[in-house]
Image (cartoon, grey):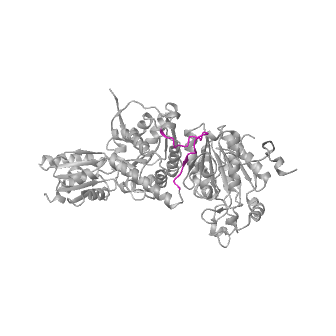
Amino acid sequence: MENLDIMKPENIVYKKPALLTDNIMHYCPGCSHGTVHKLIAEVIEEMGIQDRTIGVSPVGCSVFAYNYIDIDWQEAAHGRAPALATAAKRLCPDKYVFTYQGDGDLASIGTAEIIHACSRGENIVVIFINNGIYGMTGGQMAPTTLLGMKTSTTPYGRDPKLNGFPLKITEMLAALDGTAYITRQSVHTAAAARKAKNAIRKGFEYSAKNIGLSFIEIVSTCNSGWKLSPVEANKWMTEHMFAKYPVGDIKDVLK
Amino acid sequence: MAEKILMKGNEAIAFSAIRNGVDGYFGYPITPQSEVMETLMKEKPWETTGMVVLQAESELSSINMVYGGASCGKKVMTSSSSPGISLMCEGISYIAGAELPCVIVDVMRGGPGLGTIQPSQSDYFQTVKGGGHGDYHSIVIAPASAQDMYDFVDWGFDLAFKYRTPVIVLADGIIGQLMEKVELHPMKPRRTAEEILRDAPWATTGKPAGRERNVITSLSLDADTQEAFNQKLLAKYEAIKANEVKFSEYLTSDAEYLFVAFGCSSRICEAAVDILREEGIKAGLIRPITLFPFPEKELNRLAGQVKSMMSIELSLGQMVEDVRLAADGQCPVGFYGRQGGNIFTPEEIVEEFKKFNKLS
């Protein structure tokens, strides 16, 4: 059978989500952002909520998320996305509001905003990309950088005496009464991406139930920052990042 | 007859917000303006007009809530006092850069640092000259009474939406705390979803099929794009300067000496003018009501008429720089100020006036 014979609409098993724009992504090959963007676009498309969704993008590599997912977006100052989302959701309670934030944005400069958005139980979704490094500014230490990990500001490896310890902010947020669903996922395999997508969808569905904040951490790779090939970066992530940041649900108030 | 109620300037802000169809208030407690949020919480407008009122975890957060709400095309505001406004300056710069409308009330207290909790006008530079980073202006309007506090909320939103820019109501501890009669105008309803779509087509209201997505951002990495945006802002500020200057005059037509003062200082200066007039000295007063845009043309014209001008401020001398620029060397420009929460009396101003003009 020739390839052309099976290239028919009825045989399509996968295609680019309609909500993913045709803009060429600026992300490095191997970066997790593109995959997570695709999953979010699929969830919004499948739920049919494009006209009711407001995204809030951060400062960091994913500042340009608004170029790739075809919904209305607000671009926040560094760390402040949960404050924007709080107001958007409270003023427009019929909308689905989510933030998309990296580890520097959420777990360093924006700790106050995320903690208090969680504590107030804002009915928003937070997608938290944790790759243990600052990508946009060129590979500096993040709050989630592992001990011993080399970055441009920990050139000899992260030393707890000098640089403090990695911050497990997701576990901290699970302790807050205002959070409804807290999970940690990854997108390094097709199976993992499917689970992550289910988690994102659950977060969006929970946000419409007005039961509190849903928080989906995606343990991610930054192969450019880590100075590894995409394949090596995935391997390094499963061996090292997962040891500190184990994947799986941490809290689900409806279970 | 319109209803008149005795209230504090800070309370007037709160009642005005509820009665003028404001959608949301986001604030953080700080003296001397905490009555704004306290009054709103007591009045529970979410049960009547549907207005959202939220106490944020910091001024950083409250100004960014304003950013998020304004991005949705909503009429949103915050209030604070000097140290809190310092924290908000990042957000104000982003709001100006993203061309969002909002109203920010600054009930000034003395600084620098934690300073005092008493009244001051020492944040003229911060609010009129920028505050945050980058080439931007906020429209700055300066109330001098509790009635002004009430009226300037609505006027502020008109300006904010007309130009898609932040508007700062620059009050001080005196105006915030004094109790005066305030005339309440008829209630204005909050705008409907349809009205927001009509008036703010740029807002993040959810992208329907058939329109481009709306993106609220202040980012452009390309130099030419950013420069074109800066030029667009310049044109906006020129239009504001051409159309929105507002000031009041007191006995200026035959004045030989001119005081320039805003806010509470202008009321004290009025009494100083009266004292001098009784002595046969032809003094007058200009009260800039808009500080940006500044009434530079009017002051320039008067500088050719009077023997001298004096800027009277509760600071070490900030607006006086703009008065000098406006006078453009046509007459001497003096300054008198008090600091730390101390307030000048009319007699004290008269004495300093005579010293400066060598009239005693």
The percent coordinates of residue A16 (x first, y second) are 72, 48
- What range is drawn magenta here? B199-219
Q: Quadrant of residue B208?
A: top right
Residue beneath the point at 80% across and 47% down = A7
Q: Please report the residue visible at 70 percent of the width from the left and 59 percent of the height from the top.
A: A31
Q: Please tell me how many numbered marks the rendered image carries.
A: 0
Q: Is residue A205 left or right of residue A110?
A: right
Foreground residue among A156 and B102: B102
Q: Which of A240/B337 is in front?
A: A240
Looking at this rendering, what residue extends furthest in the bottom direction? A156
Residue A40 position within the rendered picture, expressed as x and y whole percent measured from the top left: 68, 47
Q: Nearer the viewer, residue B116 or B52?
A: B52
Query: In the image, is residue B143 above or below residue B352?
Result: above
Res B44 seen here: no
| Horizontal and vertical percent position of residue B149 | 36, 41
- Which residue reaches farthest right? A1
Which residue is pictured at 66% across the width and 50% down the height?
A: A127
Front one among A107 and B248: B248
Point out the image quarter for the N terminus of chain B: top left
Quadrant of the snapshot with the C terminus of chain B: bottom left
Magenta region, mostly helix, strand or loop? loop
